Image (cartoon, rainbow, N blue to C red):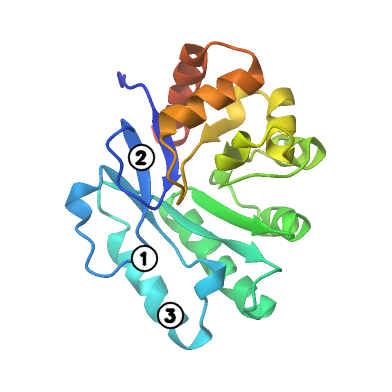
Amino acid sequence: MFHLNYIDIHTHKIRKSANIQIVDISERVNVDIEICSHYSMGVHPWFVKEMDLGKKMQNIKSHIDKNSFLAIGECGLDKVCNVDFNIQLKAFKQQINLSEKYHKPLILHIVKSFNEIIQLRIATKAKQKWIVHGFNGSYQIAKQLIDMGFYISFGHKLYQQTSKASKSIKHLPLNRIFLETDNSEFAIEEVYALAAERLNVDVSLVQRQLLLNFIDIFP
């Protein structure tokens, strides 16, 4: 059993405050993975280029067997960015295949593409855990995702009391939630404090349950 206080499920920065953090090193060059307690790697929909997609997939595969490599991502679909959606789909499907083949969870970036993500989950019959990072959608969308086995990760949007994230987290089961700092300047302790406030529970309860969630996904 881990004896840890704070889990940062998705960050782009190596932070001292989190006891467990999954650092996304996807777009970094010559990163020293030895200083990352845990890390993820994926092809972000913003940076998909069909001509070098195969090379990027091989790069992910080269990390699959490392003990500190925990998840594939962030990856997903984004209808707002200027990358061709069909190319995004191609890259995402390949990463779903890697996830299933090597039993690695996915950390998802989703913008205006929840229906497509859900349909792909059904069509591919994916069994691995999918974590929606930086969620700022409605309770109805969150519930639909959770009912299909997704986990929902909340971050800096909790700072906005009227945000969809702040409203939806109040009604979600704690055993399907994670917290993150992403690329923000906020400390993970602050995000935990905000989540506890929105949920009207003690922060220690959030810490204990998120640790159990982490162990469930990464036994």
Q: Give the residue pinned by disc 1.
A: 60
Report the residue marked by disc 3: 54
The alpha-carbon separation of the residues under discs 1 and 2 comes to: 19 Å
Asked if marks 2 and 3 touch (Cβ < 8 Å), the reply is: no
Which of these two is toward me, 135 or 159? 159
Circle 1/circle 2 CB separation < 8 Å: no
Residue pictured at 32% horizontal, 66% vertical: 28
- Label 2 crowd (10 A; few <14 / some 14-19 / many >=20): many
Instruction: Give the mark nearest the N terminus, 1 or 2.
Output: 2
Amino acid beneath label 1: Ile
Amino acid type, residue under disc 3 in the picture: Gly
Task: Kindly check if marks 1 and 3 are in contact, taking CB atoms under 8 A apart as contact.
Answer: no
Q: Quadrant of the C terminus?
A: top left
Question: SS class of the residue under badge 2?
Answer: strand
The correct choice, above or below, for 81 with respect to 39 in the image is below
Q: In front of the other: label 2 or label 3? A: 2
Name which residue type carries label 2: Gln
